[in-house]
Amino acid sequence: MGRTTLRKLLLASAWLRLFYLTFAEDVPPTSDFLRRNHAAAIVLGDYLYIDGGEVSHLDNGKNSTDKRASHALNHTLSLPLNISWNNQTVAFNKIPKPPSVPSLNCQAAWRDPSGTAFYIWGGITSYRTQPPPSELWKFTADGYGGGSWNKHEKISSVSLGKHVRTSRGAWTQSRDVGYWLGGYGTANTDTSILPPQSSDGDKNIFLAVPGITSLKMASGELTNSSSVGMGPFGTLWGGSAHHVPFGGGGEQSDGLLVFLGGVTAPVLSYLESPDHRPVEFTNITVYDPLHKKWYSQQTTGAIPTPRYQFCVVGVKGDNGTYEM
């Protein structure tokens, strides 16, 4: 694809986004609201920030006549956590996003060590629109439920060009480092992936992508490490990750990463391939990012059924344990 063609596609995508910014509602009236999905949420200070994803709503109490059941969120939203509210009284703060800042589904949100900012990574566009350039964006909160967007000032385009943007990766973070494992790539996640050249223009290609990406947020150092220990193929999409803040050994340890559920498949296999298989909870995969070592821990007791696209939380337990 030539630079001129790519520039025209990005311009058309920006105009489409401006259209929805004008006519769609990111915060519909409570009586019309249906649901939000595919968003990332993170707490900074006294506010919960919500970015990306889509929103569905009625139009004046009636089903929308639009062919699309939802639309991409064109603002960053925040909710106060230091006051009481319910579903009827809740009031979102709407923070404008410049057209250059992407609105993506299924992205990561990594909290900066300062606790006053977050970074977005990964994701896929809505309704198969052209993906944005490879850039790393940072949102800085103002302490009052607002904030502003800027590119990460310490990361180079050369470094970003070595990484393929994927969607539905398993992500988590330590205090200083954000982690993203696998996911799948399509023509709507990264411009380096070409759309299928076939008569069936509605069919998309979803490729399982290996590797674990890590971002040292303060320095902007972005690296990709082998994920060979993640199941039989080294890939995972739709799974969940959690950072356990101990283990790994040594003063420089960054804890351990635990990966749960999801789907694994041969590298670069299509999503429709029968080789895509759910990850069982009979074994849990653990990664030591300091020593770049993978471990498999067998589980016991009442074992959950396989699943993907779920949430996981963790808390320190008694006697040096950790519960998720």
Image (spheres, rainbow, N blue to C red):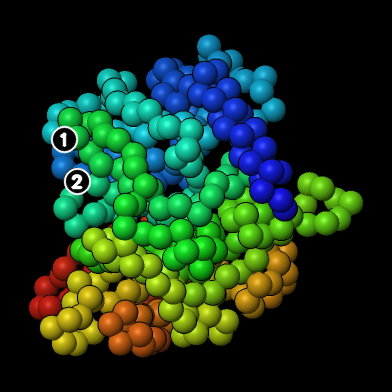
- Specify the amino acid type for callout 2: Thr
Q: In the image shown, does 157 or 173 lie closer to the viewer?
A: 157
Residue matched to label 1: 143
**Residue 147 image point, x, y percent:** 26, 34
- Give 305 or 277, whichever is nearer the viewer: 277
Residue 39 screen position, x and y as percent: 43, 44
Which residue is at the far top? 60
| Nearest to N terminus: mark 1 or mark 2 | 2
Tell me the SS state at disc 1: loop
Q: Which residue is mark 2?
A: 116
Q: From the viewer's perspective, is residue 232 above or below residue 216?
A: below
Circle 1 residues within 10 Å: few <14, some 14–19, many ≥20: few
| Residue at 51% over, 24% down | 21
Can see residue 277? no
Q: Residue at x 60, y 28 (%)?
A: 15
User: Residue drawn at (66%, 60%), measured in percent from left and top?
Assistant: 193
Could you tell me which quadrant the C terminus lies in?
bottom left
Q: Is residue 213 left or right of residue 203?
A: left
Classed neighbour count for the residue bearing mark 2: other residues with Cα under 10 Å, few (<14), some (14–19), many (≥20) = some
- Indicate the amino acid at tag 1: Gly
Q: Nearer the viewer, residue 80 or 311?
A: 80
Q: CA distance from mark 1 to mark 2?
A: 8 Å
SS under mark 2? loop
Look at the image and tell me whether residue 272 can be seen: yes
